[in-house]
Image (tube, grey):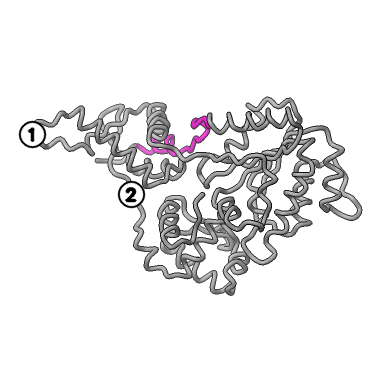
Amino acid sequence: TEMLPPEIIEELCAFEDGRLGFAAERRKICEAFDAWKTEQRRGVIAVTGQRGSGKSRLMATVPEWLNSGLPVRRAEMDRETIEPEAVLAWLMQSTAPEVERPAEGWTTDTCIEALSGLPPSLFVVDDLHRAFVRAVGGFKALRQVLTVMHAASDRHFWVCGFHGETWAWLEVVRGAVNLGVFRQRIRVDDLDEHRLRDWLEARARAAGLVLRYQHLAATGLRGTDKIRAEERARAAYWRLLVDSSRGNPRVSHAAWLTSLRQGAPGEAAVVLFAQPDSTVLEEAGDMALFLLAAVVVHDGLPVNLLANVLNISIPEVRTICRQLQGLGVLSGDAMDSYYQVVPAWSPVVDRRLRQRHLLHRV
């Protein structure tokens, strides 16, 4: 069967996680906010999720549906910043640019004092995990910014986004960072087969396509009902996709696109999707797995910080990263100085690292 026309593929390629709704997560955030309004204390919550889960989309829309009646102040940490002074300066410059920088600079005390002079506000702070690195001295910045948020949480309400793997690691290493400052942790849940099916089949219908599963159905046996066989194939396909992608919307969406072929007019035939070869990781070596664990826990890291986390030289880090990049497991930026796991590989890497007890449960 032939691939779909390029214009249809282009329309389907647009990743629209906003259609997922996040009804359960939104309800929990609203409940936490209502409780804070009543008590006027401990107004800090964490929203956690894997890369590709839709966490940042959910965070971006909080002011639209929370109806807090408060001024909104936003910040997003797009790169690792682990110097305490730099993180506090980033927080204040991003969320309260009208406040003049004190002569002594931004410290926990000066931040708390400045925040106490602001009107009660809704703070939406995403990717706060980038204020932490799993290395000696890598916790101090996150500790200080959480101290500031906690001290200001009777007056202000804070919604903080964290990478799920980072949160899981901090929960296990108790005492490294005080997660007790958070009123509640709200997980962006993985999709089950029904939500995933409804979401992506709706995407296909919006592009004018009905998905057909007859290529996956066992219809050659005598007495087989073709309609029932196709329905069983449909159910089995979505179970397999959820299992292989861990219910991650972005990973599922990419795999689903590889399944679609041209069918009758107005239809798309569904075939089995491609999956990475997991034996590649078994042959990569232990140090490659240690590096992958560091990249997964931090949701990407620059080469210099990978060297700090792994306690090896930068040239050694570059060699391992290039090996994994050549295998298609890692992707780097234009300067090959910052690396992340390729989304399609995320479930495979996750399973292998958990088998080796290099990751903790999220």
Residue topped by disc 2 = 274
Q: Is residue 35 above or below residue 297?
A: above
Q: Residue at x 72, y 54 (%)?
A: 143
How many angstroms separate mark 1 from mark 2 (CA)?
30 Å
Magenta span contains residue 7 = yes
- Residue 289 pos. (x, y %): 46, 65
- Residue closer to the observer: 280 or 169: 169
Residue 128 lies left or right of residue 244; in this view the side is right
- Residue 17: image x %, image y %? 50, 35
Residue that label 1 marks: 222
Q: In which quarter of the image is residue 45?
A: top right
The residue segment tinted magenta is: 5-22
The amino acid type, in three-letter code, at marker 2 is Ala
| Near-viewer residue (73 or 30) | 30
Up/down of 139 relative to 188, above or below: below
Q: Is 265 situated left or right of 150 in this image?
A: left
Mark 1 is on which residue type? Arg
**Disc 1, SS:** loop
Q: In this view, does 117 lie above or below 310?
A: above
Q: Which of the 4 image quarters holds residue 2?
A: top left
Residue 135 found in image quarter: bottom right
Q: Relative to residue 271, is residue 69 depicted above or below?
A: above
The residue depicted at 74 percent of the width and 53 percent of the height is 87
Q: Is residue 37 left or right of residue 357?
A: right
Looking at the rendering, in which quadrant would you find the N terminus?
top left
- Which of the two labelled residues, at mark 1 and mark 2, occupies the earlier sequence position? 1
